[in-house]
Amino acid sequence: MTSVRKEFFGSHQGQNVDLYTLTAGDGAAVRISTYGGIVTSWTAPDRNGKPADIVLGFNDLADYTSDAYLKAGPYFGAIVGRYGNRIGGARFALDGVEYKLGANNGPNNLHGGPMGFDKRVWDGTADAAGAVSLEYVSADGEMGYPGRLATKVVYSLAADNALRIDYSATTDKTTIVNLTNHSYFNLAGEGSGDILGTEVQLNAGRFTPVNENHITTGELRSVEGTPFDFRRATPIGARINGTDQQLGYAGGYDHNWVIDRGSETGLVLAAAAYEPASGRLLEVLTTEPGVQFYAGNFLNGSFTGKSGEPYERRNGFCLETQHYPDSPNKPGFPSVTLKPGETYRTTTIFKLSVR
């Protein structure tokens, strides 16, 4: 049985921000802020029963809204949208109309633009079953995107420490949408150092290479014989400093992998991460076609986390389930178009256990 508690987290631009705590039967707890839909903490026991917080973030709302944080944009734990990941040149065409977006990553639009969903206050409610629903309505033209997008994200924590995220959205005008969660994990505990010894497995035989501006080329490249082959569990640090050009472009891993789902259309296992010292195992199941594996290459110690330790380079990793980056400009990629009368629905489950 999961319980839920609501408390005041602070205020932002005159709006109250709440913090919901979901607690599972064994005491594991996930905290979610209505500002940005941020997973601010996830506390769970290791193989010896010792608890630790396994996601990067802050104790105070002010740290998430500071000028320094907003400028750097690490997106700790947030819901990102309308479009998670990059759109090249901060523009795309839809039904013969070109839309220009805010450029906030060099020439690109990243995670919805300068004022994406991660910087909005969502309306939150909790139900008797212990699920937290967050709703936000993005106005037609917000950040350059067409259509009034009514968005709902539901977080629920099962007794087996599986955090389920259900996304849905509707629009009154043809638009694009690609939502995800940007949690950084350190399965040894946030603030405990780098994640290079964590073993990652990706259910993917292909990935989408990028150019020097971090934009996908349109190719679906085989991982065979490359540092991007994680079909067998491999420590993150085993090949991350290699000479492959793709590693050079991103400073390590920051790429989208094409999930091998065969004919399956529902939830499939996309990724798994195992931290040997703690025994924590994170499995990621999703209905999405891709997953962005990011190894925290751009963290640089400028932010101090909940434990009082700075978050240095590669102190956390992300597994962002998604449609592929720059899909609106890549006709060969799975469509991200949403039309009036349709409902966008995706689900991702982060299942935590020990071994």
Image (cartoon, rainbow, N blue to C red):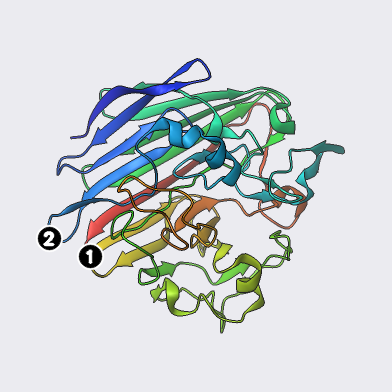
Residue holding disc 2: 48
Q: x, y (%) of residue 167? A: 49, 36
**Residue 132: quarter of image:** top left
Question: Residue visible at 63% across and 33% down?
Answer: 115
Q: Which amino acid lies under the numbered mark 2 shown in the image of this protein? A: Asn
Where is the C terminus found, in terms of image quarters? bottom left
311 shown above or below 217? above
Question: Residue visible at 30% across and 45% down?
Answer: 42
Horizontally, residue 98 falls left or right of residue 121, namely: right
Question: Residue visible at 30% across and 39% down?
Answer: 30
Residue holding disc 1: 279
Outermost residue toward the left in this view: 48
Outermost residue toward the top in this view: 14
Q: Which amino acid lies under the numbered mark 1 shown in the image of this protein? A: Gly
Q: Earlier in the sequence, mark 1 or mark 2?
A: 2
Q: x, y (%) of residue 101? A: 75, 38
Instruction: Count the labels in the image.
Output: 2
Outermost residue toward the bottom in this view: 225
Q: Is residue 39 visible?
A: yes
Q: x, y (%) of residue 235? A: 39, 74
Asked if the residue under mark 2 is in contact with the one under mark 1, i.e. CB atoms within 8 Å, the reply is yes
Residue neighbourhood size for the residue with mark 1, other residues' Cα within 10 Å, grouped as few (<14), some (14–19), many (≥20): some
Task: Indicate the secondary structure of the residue bearing disc 1.
Answer: loop
